[in-house]
Image (cartoon, rainbow, N blue to C red):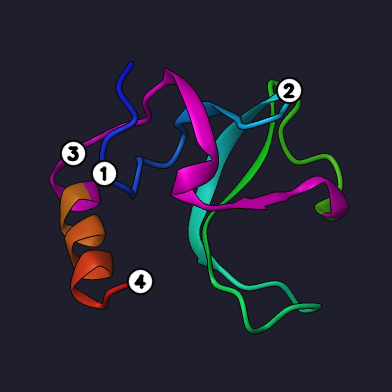
Amino acid sequence: MEIGEKYLPIGTVVKLEGGIKRVMITGYCFKTENDSENLWDYIGCLYPEGILVASQLACFNHSQIEKIYYKGLENDEEKEFVENLKEMNL
């Protein structure tokens, strides 16, 4: 499946460069408490485990995605949300 433009829909399952486990996208534009300077394109959790503990959440950028296994739900609401993100240059 082609990677294409950021932002992939919530629920998309990907493999990150150098990664072993798959990651499911759970959110966008994430800042960590330890590093408020960086704004990550995505936050995700291990797939299929899900969020077991907060320390297992993965912050990553679109450029780090190596492969898409499954693309999440795309509908009008999601498309409008992504367009708003793009307009804000995030």
* Amino acid at circle 4: Leu
Between marks 2 and 3 in the image, the one whose residue lies nearer the viewer: 2
Which of marks 4 and 1 precedes in the sequence?
1
Q: CA distance from mark 3 to mark 1?
A: 16 Å
Q: Secondary structure at mark 4?
A: loop
- The residue pinned by badge 4 equals 90
Q: CA distance from mark 2 to mark 1?
A: 22 Å
Q: Is residue 88 magenta?
A: no
Taking the spot 47% from the left edge, 34% from the top edge, the residue there is 11
- The residue pinned by badge 2 equals 21
- The residue pinned by badge 3 equals 75
Which of marks 4 and 3 precedes in the sequence?
3
Q: Secondary structure at mark 1?
A: loop
The residues colored magenta run: 55-78
Which of marks 1 and 2 precedes in the sequence?
1
Between marks 3 and 1 in the image, the one whose residue lies nearer the viewer: 1
Q: Whole-percent x and y of residue 51?
A: 75, 41
Q: CA distance from mark 3 to mark 4?
A: 21 Å
